[in-house]
Amino acid sequence: MTDHNEPPVAALLLAAGGGRRLGGRPKALLEHRGRPLVEHAVAVLRSAGCTRVHVVLGARAGAVRQRAELSGCVLVDNPDWERGMGSSLRAGLDSLAGTGARAALVSLVDQPGIGPEAVARVLAGYSDESSLVSAAYDGVRGHPVLFGAAHWAGVATTATGDRGARAYLKEREAGIRLVECGDVARPYDIDTAADLQHLE
């Protein structure tokens, strides 16, 4: 059953990574401003106007559920998280089937430099199920990315390893609406010990 009062765009937060280059510290549980990073990422999505948030968990999912305040979110377990981001993207898109969502805004848990302003800009680019919108930083495509439902099957088919939707987007470069966000966000990833300096 679909609720017609629900907004058409659901946010999909990929938070399953095990932090291999961080000595196996799950990214969702890294501390940022005194709270787990996954909680910060959900707050950013909500501040930007996303009321439906699906969070894909993987590494230490039980601990994330215990330690992070994620009420109101749909929590999706990805048992194949070790295979990379592609499996999380597929699990997340699967979780949206039958919800009535007409687009998914995909964001990554390890990019705390991307705040509500950038997310809101990408969200505003949605028009219908064929929408394909991406944040850009000085003209270079980054996250978040909004996929209309018409693209989900194609994305799921090509999402493998750590590449996520990269191959799918590359083939459709001309059809992507780029929304410049370099003036309001910084798209660094928290991947290595050196990157932890970005956390507060």
Image (cartoon, rainbow, N blue to C red):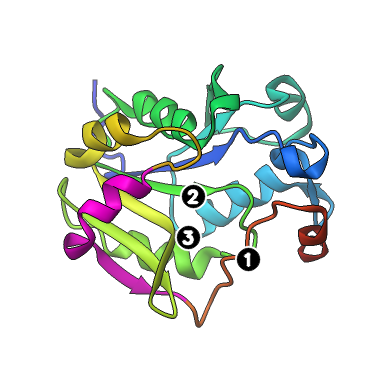
- Secondary structure of residue under mark 1: loop
Q: Which of 15 and 45 is in front in this view?
A: 15
Q: Residue at left 23%, top 61%? A: 173
- Secondary structure of residue under mark 3: loop
Q: What stretch is highlighted in magenta?
A: 165-181
**Image height check: is 5 above or below 186?**
above
Tell me the kind of residue under disc 1.
Gly
Q: Earlier in the sequence, mark 2 or mark 3?
A: 3
Q: Residue at left 27%, top 64%? A: 125
Horizontal and vertical percent position of residue 77: 55, 21
Decide: marks 1, 2 in contact (CB < 8 A)?
Answer: no
Q: Residue at left 17%, top 64%? A: 174
Q: How far apart are marks 3 and 1 (CA)?
A: 14 Å
Number of other residues with Cα within 10 Å of mark 2, as a class: few under 14, some 14 to 19, many 20 or more: many
Decide: marks 2, 3 in contact (CB < 8 A)?
Answer: no
Quarter of the rendering containing residue 145:
bottom left
Decide: marks 3, 1 in contact (CB < 8 A)?
Answer: no
Q: Residue at left 16%, top 39%? A: 150
Tell me the kind of residue under disc 3.
Ala
Q: Is residue 106 left or right of residue 46?
A: left
- Tell me the quarter of the image containing the N terminus: top left
The residue that disc 3 covers is 48
Q: Which of marks 3 and 1 is nearer the N terminus?
A: 3
The residue that disc 2 covers is 107
Q: How far apart are marks 1 and 2 (CA)?
A: 12 Å
